Image: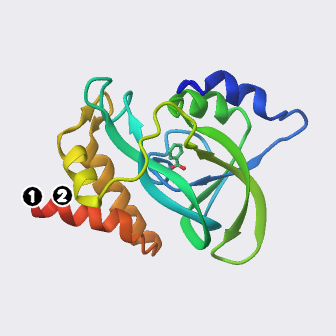
């Protein structure tokens, strides 16, 4: 699948008649909230882990020197904490462009930290997209992140901001924190 997912996402859901929908954020959506929302709640989804396995050519790296950003990988029994936003469907006109490098919107069940569940959407870059890099040792991922810079800024800033947000949310994402520790050790 081509890495540019704007058209794929536009065709994926019929939002007619829908006034608002929950969106689960597990990466930059947690700390870069450049879209309007009606409500915001800490939440989690089951069966997924966060991994820095997706290349960023357009935000935190370039075509010549891509950065690494997060996607979700299926893992039975896992819980991924993040932030849920209740948004108007029009928000996706902006977010589908912002997250165009390989991310498709999927339906998911959100569990709110305060209790209760809701159906919502989550952006996932699956392994069949052209920008999927896959597994690498965390020390190697840290080395790639340390040098990558793109139009949105240094890849390391993305990592550090996400790690701080995950601490605030109480997500024990050992993968993110291991990469953060490597980056701090070598800086
Ligand atoms: C998120 O924070 O949920 C997100 C991460 C990468 C791409 C799109 C969304």
| Residue named by callout 2 | 183
Between 5 and 95, which is closer to the camera in this rendering? 5
In the rendered view, does 15 fall on the left or right side of 66? right
* Quadrant of the image occupied by residue 65: top left
Residue drawn at (58%, 43%) of the image: 126
**Label 2 crowding class (10 Å Cα cut-off): few <14, some 14-19, many 20+?**
many
For the N terminus, the image quarter is: top right
For the C terminus, the image quarter is: bottom left
**Label 1 SS:** loop
The x, y position of residue 102, in whole percent, is 54, 33
Q: Is residue 58 above or below residue 153?
A: above
* Quadrant of the image occupied by residue 90: top right
Question: Mark 2–mark 1 contact, CB under 8 Å?
Answer: yes
Between 20 and 65, which is closer to the camera in this rendering? 65
In the rendered view, does 36 fall on the left or right side of 17? left
Q: Is residue 42 above or below residue 2?
A: below
**Label 2 SS:** helix
Residue drawn at (31%, 27%) of the image: 151
The total number of labels drawn is 2
Residue drawn at (69%, 26%) of the image: 8
| Residue named by callout 1 | 186
Which numbered marker is on residue 82? Answer: none
Could you tell me how far apart the alpha carbons at marks 2 and 1 are, in whole angstroms? 5 Å
The x, y position of residue 7, in whole percent, is 67, 21
* Quadrant of the image occupied by residue 69: top left
Give the color scheme: rainbow, by chain, secondary structure or one colour.
rainbow
């Amino acid at each position: 699948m081509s890495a540019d997912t704007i058209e794929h996402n536009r065709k994926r859901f019929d939002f007619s008649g829908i006034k608002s929908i929950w969106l689960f954020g597990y990466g930059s959506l947690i700390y870069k909230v450049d879209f309007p929302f009606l409500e915001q709640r800490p939440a989690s989804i089951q069966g997924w882990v966060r991994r820095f396995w997706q290349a960023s050519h357009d935000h935190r790296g370039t075509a010549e020197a891509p950065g690494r950003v997060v996607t979700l990988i299926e893992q039975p029994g896992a819980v991924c904490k993040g932030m849920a936003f209740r948004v108007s469907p029009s928000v996706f006109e902006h977010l589908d462009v912002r997250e165009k490098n390989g991310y498709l919107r999927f339906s998911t069940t959100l569990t709110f930290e305060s209790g209760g569940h809701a159906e919502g959407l989550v952006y996932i870059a699956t392994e069949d997209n052209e920008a999927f890099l896959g597994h690498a040792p965390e020390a190697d991922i840290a080395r790639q992140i340390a040098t990558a810079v793109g139009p949105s800024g240094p890849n390391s800033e993305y990592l550090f901001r996400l790690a701080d947000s995950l601490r605030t949310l109480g997500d024990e994402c050992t993968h993110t924190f291991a990469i953060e520790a490597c980056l701090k050790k070598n800086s």
